[in-house]
Image (cartoon, rainbow, N blue to C red):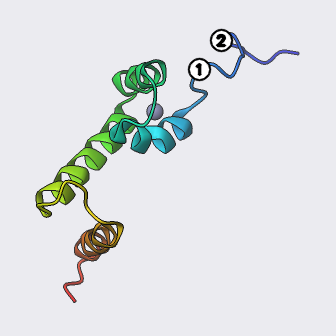
Amino acid sequence: MSHHCTGAGTGDQLSDCTEALLRVYEFLDGEMGPAECAKIQAHLDACGPCLKQYNLDLALKALIRRSCACEQAPVELRTTILHRITMVRLGGTD
Ligand SMILES: [Zn+2]
């Protein structure tokens, strides 16, 4: 047994970036509790790549909200916008 253990080893803290990135959407949508929010926030504060991804998602969310006057963007619209953004990124216009 020579592996280096840094933490308590319980499932109580983020093991790596994967969980943080998976849960960024819940975090953005305010679907998690205060304790969970604090956990993600702490990881974003400490992890540059995850913070960058979070900012991208945040910008995307703002874009979707701005392009629809409704309080909630329908899933179809959201999918369309996401698809369009992907096309722009790939360099195709149509
Ligand atoms: Zn991370």
Alpha carbon separation for disc pair 2 and 1? 9 Å
Depth check, mark 2 against mark 1: the one in front is: 1
Question: In the orientation shown, which residue stands out farthest toward the front?
Answer: 71
- Left or right of 31, for residue 2: right
Q: Nearer the viewer, residue 77 or 7?
A: 77
Asked which secondary structure carries label 2, the reply is loop
Q: Could you tell me residue 51's position as x and y percent?
A: 33, 35
Q: Could you tell me residue 47's position as x and y percent?
A: 40, 28
* The N terminus lies in quadrant: top right
For the residues bearing labels 2 and 1, Cβ distance under 8 angstroms: yes
Q: Nearer the viewer, residue 3 or 67?
A: 67
The crowding category of the residue bearing disc 1, from other C-alpha atoms within 10 Å (few below 14, some 14 to 19, many at least 20), is some
Q: Is mark 1 within 8 Å of ligand 1?
A: no
Residue type at mark 2: give it.
Answer: Gly
Residue type at mark 1: give it.
Answer: Gln
State the image quarter where residue 2 is shown: top right
Q: Earlier in the sequence, mark 2 or mark 1?
A: 2
Q: Nearer the viewer, residue 46 or 2?
A: 46
Residue at 16%, 60% (x, y): give it: 70
Q: Nearer the viewer, residue 81 or 18?
A: 81
Classify 24 as above or below 70.
Answer: above
Residue at 68%, 22% (x, y): give it: 11
- Left or right of 36, for residue 16: right
Question: In the orientation shown, which residue stands out farthest toward the right?
Answer: 1
Q: Please name the residue that numbered disc 1 is placed on.
A: 13
Q: Please name the residue that numbered disc 2 is placed on.
A: 7
